[in-house]
Amino acid sequence: MTTHAEELARYRARTRKSFALFERAQEVLPLGVSSNFRSFKPYPFFIERAEGSRMWDRDGHEYVDFSMCFGALMVGHAHPVLVKAIAGAAGRGTLYGMSHEPEVHAAELLCERFGLEQVRFTSSGSESTMHALRLARTFTGRDKVLKFEGAYHGGHDTVLASVKPAASKVGDARRPQVVPQSEGIPALTLENTLVATWNDPKGVREILEAHRDEVAAVIVEPVMMNIGVVPPRDGFLQELRSLCDESGALLVFDEVKTGAKLAWGGAQPYFGVKADIVCLAKAIGGGLPLGAFGGRRELMDEIAASRSFHAGTYASNPLGIAACTAALEQVLVPAVYEKATALGDALAAGHNEILRKHGLDACAVNVGVNGTVFWRKTPPTNYREWLEQDVEAFWRYWHMCLNRDVIPQAQSYDEQWTVSVAHTQQDVERMLEVFDEIAREMA
Ligand SMILES: Cc1ncc(COP(=O)(O)O)c(C=O)c1O
């Protein structure tokens, strides 16, 4: 049996070149990374290249990658169709700052696929949710936004509250405290953010009633995917739809993680619930930084009338549009979802069987192409339950996986695996083989 300390020593021994780079990086990049979510202990390894379902690190190890850049790469790494489309577009100029036909075509594709009348392009998920919420505030003439405890909607002030609040600060589950996720967010801004508990329709109702005629939008990740994978209880999204209709708030689906992954058309057809505004990014960009938000014309008219501001130098940039179009038309076609979902379900079933065999208090959940192992006996149904797990066990499992050349999911226990179009049955078998060995050691 190897202890966690021994696994860490093994990690250090096999990633010496990464460590040298990490030391250099720390001089010029806070934490040595370009996004805090990429940091993990003892230090992150550095990537040299990626292709299909594989990534190679600086020290020459080949990993089966189930992170897929936090789920952004439903198309897999360096898909030949995407490489060709991006290279072709690059030769025609990378930025125009003017209109071009391909952006119209890509907008048509998004509208058709996600049941929207109009969209505007952005360059990231954060921008998509930021503009969506401004649009909701403009349309309703209200200031407050209701989000769920544990949900992440990007890095802007309104939604950077109660993302990962400490257990000591969360307050009453029915009326959770609004806990800033960062210093530097004006208290006045957070007066307009309300927080509810996921899967608690009574709590949502109470909050909306306490703030009658004040709430512009209820923003949700239709499947919470910043606390592993926590789906809505049967009927919860439908209840949110009704509560929004009663209160006059708009229902905003943050589909940055679910869009073009959960199903061909995302969460709306999957759950049979219509949102007022849909926010997109990650998978729709085919690996390039591209996002969008959209809804019915009546809402988007606020932008046309210049009442709700939206602009962006890189919005609908030709490279992103070429990647988006190729991904949607040629790669993320309806047929791929059945296969990838079956592999995701097989991963969860395989993990659960192994956990049972070795008698470990953990469980695996998969929804669509995304799943995770929760280091607790039963799947959590909200943030507070998710908090109650064996975090040490996660990190031991994480380092053990890396030492055995698999990246089981995106870094940290709030993330999940993504089965992309590039993954095969062999990749799933390899993951399960490694997990069997790890679970045996951990039992
Ligand atoms: C649900 C959700 N919304 C928004 C964002 C922000 O997207 P981006 O990192 O592209 O700004 C993320 C990022 O992970 C996300 O998971």
Image: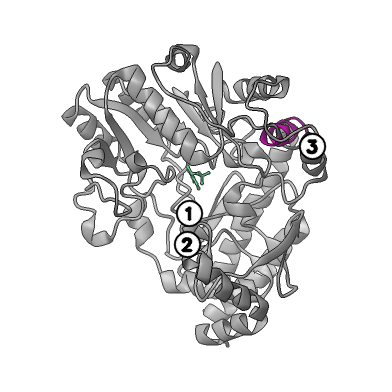
* Residue position for label 3: 85
Is the Cβ of the residue at disc 3 closer than 8 Å to that at disc 2? no
Q: Amino acid at mark 3?
A: Ala
Q: Viewer-proximal residue, 42 or 218?
A: 42
Mark 3 → mark 1, Cα distance in angstroms? 33 Å
The answer, for residue 299, to whether it is visible in the render is: yes
Query: Is residue 101 within the magenta segment?
Result: no
Query: Is residue 323 within the magenta segment?
Result: yes
Q: Which of marks 2 and 1 precedes in the sequence?
A: 1
Q: Amino acid at mark 1?
A: Gly
* Residue position for label 1: 228
Task: Label 3, secondary structure: give it.
Answer: helix
On whether ligand 1 comes within 8 Å of the CB at mark 2, the answer is: no
Going by the image, does 160 lie left or right of 344?
left
Residue stretch in magenta: 319-330
* Crowd around label 2: few <14 · some 14–19 · many ≥20 (10 Å): many
Mark 3 → mark 2, Cα distance in angstroms? 35 Å
Q: Residue furthest left?
A: 210
Task: Label 1, secondary structure: give it.
Answer: loop
Task: Label 2, secondary structure: give it.
Answer: loop
Q: Which of marks 2 and 3 precedes in the sequence?
A: 3
* Residue position for label 2: 413
Q: Measured along the vertical axis of the image, is residue 22 above or below residue 305?
A: below
Q: Position of residue 86 (x, y in %)?
A: 76, 39
Q: Amino acid at mark 2?
A: Tyr
Q: Position of residue 143 (x, y in %)?
A: 27, 28
* Crowd around label 1: few <14 · some 14–19 · many ≥20 (10 Å): many
Is the Cβ of the residue at disc 1 closer than 8 Å to that at disc 2? yes
Q: Quadrant of residue 302?
A: top left
